[in-house]
Amino acid sequence: MLNTKELKQTRTISLVLIVLAVISLLVVILGWILPILWIASWIFSIVNLVLMIVAAIKSSKIDRVSMILIIVGIFISIVGIIGLILLILKINKLLSENEISEHVQIAE
């Protein structure tokens, strides 16, 4: 399991990756209308690929389901977005449980 700092870093990477994946998907769709956007699509896709691999590695220590969805999301972006959302929800749950347990220990 990751500590709080690593969980927050993974959450930040996941949030950035969701935004990047959505932008990449929109650029690919708009690329059919404006062919000049294919260059931007390639750039977004390469950055998206690298960050998806990082997110998959970090999510393997947190949640197996989101890790599998993120790996599939390398090829199918919608599935990757769903995996990232599940990962963020799991991280938020772990952070809130950790915060509650810290408050209980302080109160004792």
Image: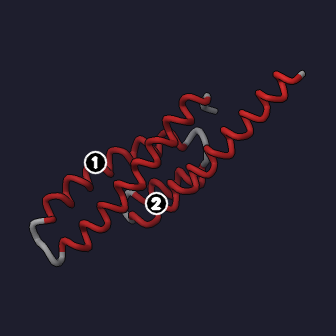
Measured along the vertical axis of the image, is residue 82 above or below residue 30? above
**Quarter of the figure with residue 95:** top right
Q: Give the amino acid at mark 2.
A: Ile
Q: Give the amino acid at mark 1.
A: Val
Residue 37 % position (x, y): 15, 65
- Estimate the spatial distance between the alpha carbons at disc 1 and disc 2, rounded to whole Å: 15 Å
Q: At 61% across and 28% down in the image, what residue appears?
A: 3
How many neighbours does mark 1 have within 10 angstroms: few (below 14), some (14-19), or many (20 or more)?
some
Residue 44 % position (x, y): 25, 54
How many neighbours does mark 2 have within 10 angstroms: few (below 14), some (14-19), or many (20 or more)?
many
Residue 24 % position (x, y): 29, 61
For the residues bearing labels 1 and 2, Cβ distance under 8 angstroms? no
Q: At 61% across and 47% down in the image, what residue appears?
A: 63
Q: At 41% across and 41% down in the image, what residue appears?
A: 54
Residue bearing the label numbered 2: 81
Residue that lies at the very extreme toward the front in this rendered image: 107
Horizontal placement of 39 versus 77: left or right?
left
Residue that lies at the very extreme toward the left in this rendered image: 36
SS at badge 1: helix
Residue 15 % position (x, y): 45, 49
Measured along the vertical axis of the image, is residue 28 above or below residue 7? below
Nearest to the observer: residue 79 or residue 102: 102
Residue bearing the label numbered 1: 47
Horizontal placement of 56 versus 5: left or right?
left
